[in-house]
Image (spheres, rainbow, N blue to C red):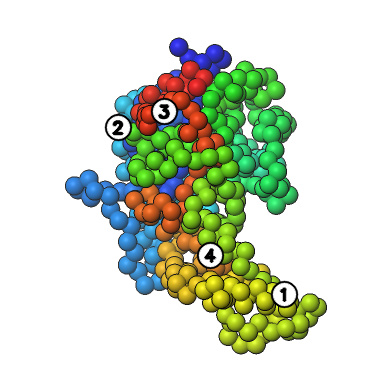
């Protein structure tokens, strides 16, 4: 029996539950999880962000790059991305067996996003119902959706962002916009759309923000029958009962990104699943270390905390004596054109005594202090860049025109492709980025998961439909 107030909807010509699986790249949502979610009657989402492909024996093909240039490696990455996503969609569609629906998720800020999306849709005609897309302003999403006759579901974090997309492009293809995903900046895992005008330390109630998004949609002529998908922080549906059949909000769907991580079909390694059961409130950090330049949320592990510490070992400098910068930095740097405050020079001496002997310049006229091993890893990762983003702050890569952002590469960030590939395929969970939503602490509190119980996707969806 379904949870009170939650009724099936019509999507892609088929009756489905208004439950969306959040697509999580790299390889944290694949055919097994999304196909099972659709088979349970929901909307499964294949992550099309550098998804896995397989050899004839069914083993995952390692994404190894052979080209000598960034541009060459970027082209290899696009081929990997298209081949992988196509394989994942086909397998998910087979698992779904005609039930539910299969969406794909792409990040507009990923390298070659348009080329990848078009390549995947060209080879999966009739299999994909819709495309969710965020991490940027994907103006071309509606145009691509129209070309391949699929629905599109833009991901936004404010009414303002939706209005910009609608006025510039989406109003021209209104009939294919199946829903608008509201991704809460303070609750959702992974990248989000927190603006510079919003305080990352001061979460806002999602209800008035979604209400404002609906009002914006109405003002642009979008009917209330086009749902808003609430993404971020959703655990027990009974806690959201006042959102269902609420005339202020119009039609509402719910997206689950974190809960599907801990299922039998979830492709993430066992160590990652086991760690999810140990997370406490406050163990997920909203941070801005991602090379995309966007805020994102991930588990506070040694890898993430090392990035925090790296940025704390940071001092501003001037190239000439000016203001409070009255002494020359004499450790960690080569040359004399680093003028700092006496206090900051003393701090630098302390960091060097602790083993952080290398000073690396940032694009913001500061230097950070790192160990020799950290410096070597940073420089190697920057040199090995395979162009996984449209604009990368860490390596200064850009996926078009002259292939560079024109800015200094930022050592305060990291190679996100390397880290996400590592953790998804069995790398040390303490030494790589571990995305999760801010409600992940509830795994430890929810009796559903007691005695180390791991549900199948079907069991999870059935549980969610009860309100729990």
**Nearest the camera: 446 or 462?**
446
- Classify residue 187 by image quadrant: top right
Q: Nearer the viewer, mark 2 or mark 4?
A: 4
Q: Position of residue 189 (x, y in %)?
A: 53, 43
Say which residue appears at 47% left-offset and 33% top-offset: 443
Q: Which mark is residue 394?
A: 4
C-alpha separation, residue under disc 3 versus residue under disc 4: 41 Å
Whether residue 130 can be seen here: no
Q: Does 172 sit left or right of 112 as displayed?
A: right
User: Mark 3–mark 4 contact, CB under 8 Å?
Assistant: no
Q: Position of residue 2 (x, y in %)?
A: 48, 14
Q: Which residue is mark 3?
A: 450
Label located before the other in sequence (1 or 2): 2
Label located before the other in sequence (3 or 1): 1
Say which residue appears at 66% left-offset and 25% top-offset: 249
Is label 4 in a helix, a strand or a loop?
A: loop
Q: Does 454 sit left or right of 360 as displayed?
A: left
Q: Nearer the viewer, mark 1 or mark 2?
A: 1
Label located before the other in sequence (2 or 4): 2
**Nearest the camera: 302 or 364?**
302
Q: Nearer the viewer, mark 3 or mark 4?
A: 3
User: Mark 1–mark 2 contact, CB under 8 Å?
Assistant: no
Q: Which mark is residue 343?
A: 1
Q: Is residue 277 above or below residue 328?
A: above
Mark 2, Cα crowd under 10 Å, few <14 / some 14-19 / many 20+, is some
Q: Which residue is mark 2?
A: 94
């Amino acid at each position: 029996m379904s949870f009170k107030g939650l009724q099936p909807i019509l999507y892609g010509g088929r009756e489905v539950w208004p439950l969306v699986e959040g697509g999580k790249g790299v390889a944290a949502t694949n055919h097994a999880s999304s196909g099972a979610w659709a088979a349970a009657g929901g909307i499964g989402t294949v992550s099309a962000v550098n998804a896995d492909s397989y050899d004839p024996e069914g083993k995952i093909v390692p994404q190894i790059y052979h080209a000598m240039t960034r541009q060459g490696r970027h082209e290899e990455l696009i081929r990997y991305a298209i081949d992988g996503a196509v394989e994942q969609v086909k397998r998910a569609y087979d698992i779904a067996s005609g039930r539910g629906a299969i969406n794909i998720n792409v990040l507009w800020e990923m390298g070659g996003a348009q080329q990848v999306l078009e390549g995947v849709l060209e080879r999966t005609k009739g299999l994909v119902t819709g495309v969710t897309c965020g991490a940027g302003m994907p103006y071309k999403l509606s145009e691509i959706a129209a070309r391949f006759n699929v629905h599109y579901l833009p991901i936004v974090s404010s009414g303002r962002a939706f209005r910009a997309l609608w006025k510039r492009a989406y109003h021209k293809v209104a009939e294919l916009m199946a829903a608008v995903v509201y991704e809460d900046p303070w609750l959702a895992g992974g990248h989000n759309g927190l603006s510079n005008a919003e305080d990352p330390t001061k979460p806002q109630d999602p209800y008035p923000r979604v209400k404002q998004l609906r009002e914006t949609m109405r003002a642009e002529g979008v009917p209330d029958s086009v749902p808003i998908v609430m993404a971020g922080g959703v655990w027990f549906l009974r806690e959201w009962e006042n959102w269902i059949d609420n005339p202020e909000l119009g039609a509402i769907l719910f997206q689950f990104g974190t809960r599907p991580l801990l299922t039998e079909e979830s492709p993430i390694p066992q160590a990652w699943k086991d760690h999810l059961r140990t997370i406490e409130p406050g163990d997920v950090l909203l941070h801005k270390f991602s090379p995309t330049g966007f805020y994102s949320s991930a588990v506070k592990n040694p890898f993430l905390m090392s990035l925090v510490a790296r940025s704390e070992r940071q001092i501003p400098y001037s190239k000439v004596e000016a203001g409070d910068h009255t002494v020359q930095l004499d450790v960690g740097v080569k040359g004399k054109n680093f003028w700092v405050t006496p206090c900051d020079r003393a701090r630098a001496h302390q960091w060097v005594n602790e083993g952080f002997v290398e000073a690396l310049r940032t694009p913001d006229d500061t230097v950070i202090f790192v160990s020799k091993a950290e410096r070597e890893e940073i420089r190697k990762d920057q040199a090995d860049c395979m162009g996984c983003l449209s604009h990368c702050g860490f390596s200064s890569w850009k996926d078009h025109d002259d292939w560079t952002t024109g800015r200094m590469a930022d050592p305060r960030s990291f190679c996100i492709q390397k880290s996400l590939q590592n953790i998804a395929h069995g790398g040390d969970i303490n030494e790589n980025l571990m995305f999760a939503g801010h409600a992940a602490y509830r795994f430890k509190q929810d009796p559903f998961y007691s005695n180390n119980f791991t549900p199948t996707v079907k069991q999870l969806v059935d549980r969610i439909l009860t309100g729990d």
